[in-house]
Image: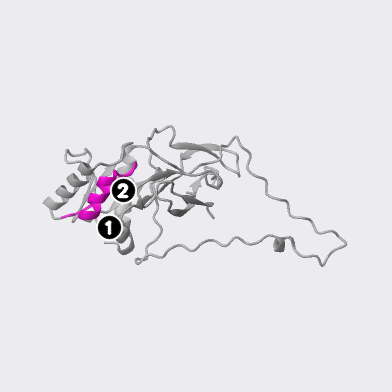
Amino acid sequence: MAETVPVRCPSCRRDHLYAAQVYPCPCGAPVTPPLLRAAPAEPITHRTWTDDWVTVRCRECGRQDQWPQPELGCLCGTVLRIPVRPVSAPAPAAPAPASPGPAAPDSTPPLAARPSRIPLPHTATAVARPSFRPVTIRTARDAVTAAALYLKWLGFRDVVQPEVRPSSGIDLRGPGLVAQVDPSTRPATLRDVECLWLNGLTISASSVFFSLAGYADDARSRADDLGIPLFVMDLTGSPQPVNGPADELVSTGV
């Protein structure tokens, strides 16, 4: 099971429970970034590709690889960086279970002294779907691919991306759908949201926006007024809804 940590957004004080993404090591073992439970999450105000990757060591074979820095998109629009323990720092040692002595065959089993961890239940959605399978984002093209896969998972059909990005800024199209993907290091602006809405209005299509760096406050407010779903994406390729229309789309699907 993936490691989870409680996360509080410093901007709106909303509490979250973050589950670390699991990656496959070349040896076949599952690998997760070692999260720091005591360190607070920090808002991402500026992105660099170097800072968006962390080194993770496989516990099975000892191999070290670069994986995306864990991130969480808060409903207020803030994108949070989840702290990770550096590989140079030793992992906290688990207490060794006491060995029962030969003279105490009826002693309490060691497992009884350790309380079981009870996972928090996941919130059920109105639409039953298989788990979304994200793709790691390393380039801007990867971000568009991840968004296309997510839209198909939501129920949109025949979602395609042009070989060359058009001047309209529309990265993805489908029957009754236009979507924009902003992989830049700045929050999406009010103009970005309104341009997407106008493109959708022209062809009577629904508009969906994906951003890696979140949204400006006026952009979020305008998207709420226009009913445009907004999603933030981290480098694992897992979009998170950040406004009401996006929550409704995830809950009900297309």
Residue 159 appears in the rendering: no
N-terminal-most mark, 2 or 1: 2
How dense is the environment of label 1, judged by Cα within 10 Å: few (below 14), some, or many (20 and up)? many
Mark 2 or 1, closer to the camera: 1
Q: Is residue 153 left or right of residue 22?
A: left
Q: Residue at x 60, y 41 (%)?
A: 61
Q: Is residue 99 magenta?
A: no
Image location of residue 174, percent across then percent down = 21, 53
- SS class, disc 2: helix
Check the picture and name the quadrant holding the C terminus. Answer: bottom left
- Which disc number belongs to residue 245? 1
Quarter assignment of residue 99: bottom right
In front of the other: 43 or 33? 43
Q: Residue at x 43, y 32 (%)?
A: 50
**What range is drawn magenta here?**
205-226
Circle 2 residue: 147
Measured along the vertical axis of the image, is residue 157 above or below residue 193?
below
Q: Is residue 53 left or right of residue 105?
A: left
Q: Residue flagged by tag 1: what amino acid is it? A: Pro
